[in-house]
Image (spheres, helix red, strand yellow):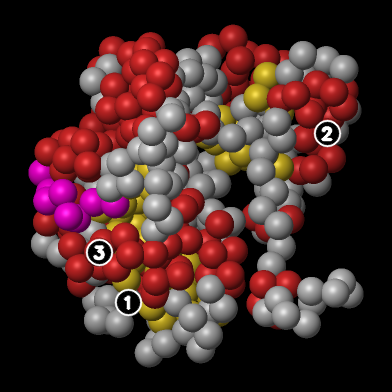
């Protein structure tokens, strides 16, 4: 044990490290082959050209501190979502907002509730705040809202719900979420994580499904903080821009502990410009919908049963250790996300929906990596 162990709290010493998706450069150095990355749910078309130009222009002013309140972006988001500007907080990605929520609402003796096989940041930020993390079983690869309700008690302060869920891609219809919130105790706030909102909303319109009433919850000042991000559909993952919408009073408390100058000026400029590029956005949405269906058909022909997805990725039970399979895929030039370890799905992988050529490469790599293996 190191010399700082006596002064670092035990709940911090016990935290596991967050393990991100493998970077392309690392995998190429390990295997000596050119890699395609379909492991971190990034936009295969990159950022909007308008966003790139805006970032380049804003970079000329990086000698000045950014607007710590992100006033221009908050006002634009408020107009877009038809909510008040004081109901919005802009953070460095939605993961930072999850940490702010945990530090604001949790502490020793309190707890947060979520589902198994959901976003691995939820237990990390909960335990980092010194609170207990309660995890309930899934139902049909998705959130079991009844089980979550049963796990809530007088010491519960947060419930994390990913909709669609990462990594399974499953979606909770709006009516089910309404019923869950209607029976929520007064002492609980729901972190409604809609990082993949854009993809789910696009597909819900095409499939004739009512997906989200999140903005209505915000207007009604329900005990809900809705999390959104520019990292996925808008392709700005490296710029780190996310935001939350919720009750003005609670957003005000979150803002008090948010570090100053958390989001850079170029990141704000890129996000504002991305909101104007409807052509790039619609191209990304159409590709995802079409290629998701193509990938499902190919996988089913191979004998797999991918979970029905409402996001830009597929969850696949492989019938073998996912870390071992992922290494074989990397030998074939393909990076995916094995879901063993903290994810709790030892035999599953998550694969991002890429551009058509990338998806074809994944299917070919999977065929090569599973030659002679039993497909389930």
Query: Residue 117 vs residue 170: left or right?
Result: right
Residue 219 point in image, percent of width and height: 12, 56
The residue pinned by badge 2 equals 327
Write down the quadrant of residue 371 in the picture.
top right
Mark 1 or 2, which is nearer the eye? Answer: 1
Query: In which quarter of the view is residue 104 placed?
Result: bottom left
Q: Earlier in the sequence, mark 1 or mark 2?
A: 1
The kind of secondary structure element at disc 1 is loop
Badge 2 density bin: few <14, some 14–19, many ≥20, Cα 10 Å: some
**Residue denoted by label 3:** 252
Residue at 39% in and 64% down: 257
The residue carrying pointer 1 sits among few (fewer than 14), some (14 to 19) or many (20 or more) residues within 10 Å by Cα, namely: many
- Is residue 24 placed above or below 79 in the rendered structure? above
Point out the stretch of residues depicted in magenta: 82-89
* Residue 196 visible in image: no
Residue bearing the label numbered 1: 188
Quarter that holds the C terminus: top right
Q: Was residue 196 drawn as part of the magenta stretch in this picture?
A: no
């Amino acid at each position: 044990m190191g010399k700082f162990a006596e002064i670092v709290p035990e709940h911090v010493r016990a935290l596991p490290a967050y393990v991100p998706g493998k970077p392309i450069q690392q995998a190429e150095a390990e295997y000596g082959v050119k890699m395609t990355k379909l492991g971190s749910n990034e936009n295969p078309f990159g950022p909007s050209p308008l966003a790139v130009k805006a970032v380049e222009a804003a970079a000329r002013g990086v000698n000045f501190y950014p607007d710590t309140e992100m006033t221009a972006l908050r006002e634009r988001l408020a107009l877009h979502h038809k909510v008040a500007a004081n109901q919005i907080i802009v953070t460095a990605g939605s993961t930072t907002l999850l940490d702010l929520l945990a530090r604001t609402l949790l502490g020793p003796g309190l707890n947060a509730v979520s589902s198994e096989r959901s976003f691995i940041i939820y237990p990390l930020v909960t335990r980092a705040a010194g609170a207990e993390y309660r995890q309930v079983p899934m139902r049909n690869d998705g959130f079991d809202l009844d089980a979550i309700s049963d796990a809530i008690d007088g010491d519960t302060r947060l419930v994390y719900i990913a909709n669609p869920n990462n990594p399974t891609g499953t979606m909770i219809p709006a009516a089910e979420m309404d019923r869950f919130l209607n029976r929520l105790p007064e002492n609980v706030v729901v972190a409604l994580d809609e990082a993949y909102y854009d993809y789910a909303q696009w597909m819900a319109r095409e499939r004739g499904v009512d997906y989200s009433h999140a903005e209505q919850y915000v207007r009604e000042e329900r005990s809900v903080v809705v999390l959104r991000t520019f990292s996925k559909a808008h392709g700005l993952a490296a710029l780190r821009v996310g935001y939350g919408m919720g009750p003005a009073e609670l957003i005000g408390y979150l803002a008090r502990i948010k570090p100053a100058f958390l989001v850079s000026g170029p990141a704000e400029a890129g996000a504002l410009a991305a909101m104007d590029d409807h052509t790039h956005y619609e191209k990304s949405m159409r590709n995802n919908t079409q290629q998701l269906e193509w990938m499902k058909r190919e996988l089913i022909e191979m004998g797999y049963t991918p979970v029905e997805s409402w996001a830009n990725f597929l969850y696949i039970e492989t019938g073998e250790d996912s870390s071992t399979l992922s290494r074989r895929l990397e030998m074939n030039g393909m990076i995916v996300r094995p879901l063993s370890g903290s994810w709790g799905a030892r035999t599953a992988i998550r694969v991002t929906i890429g551009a058509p050529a990338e998806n074809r490469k994944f299917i070919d790599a999977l065929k090569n990596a599973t030659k002679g293996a039993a497909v389930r």
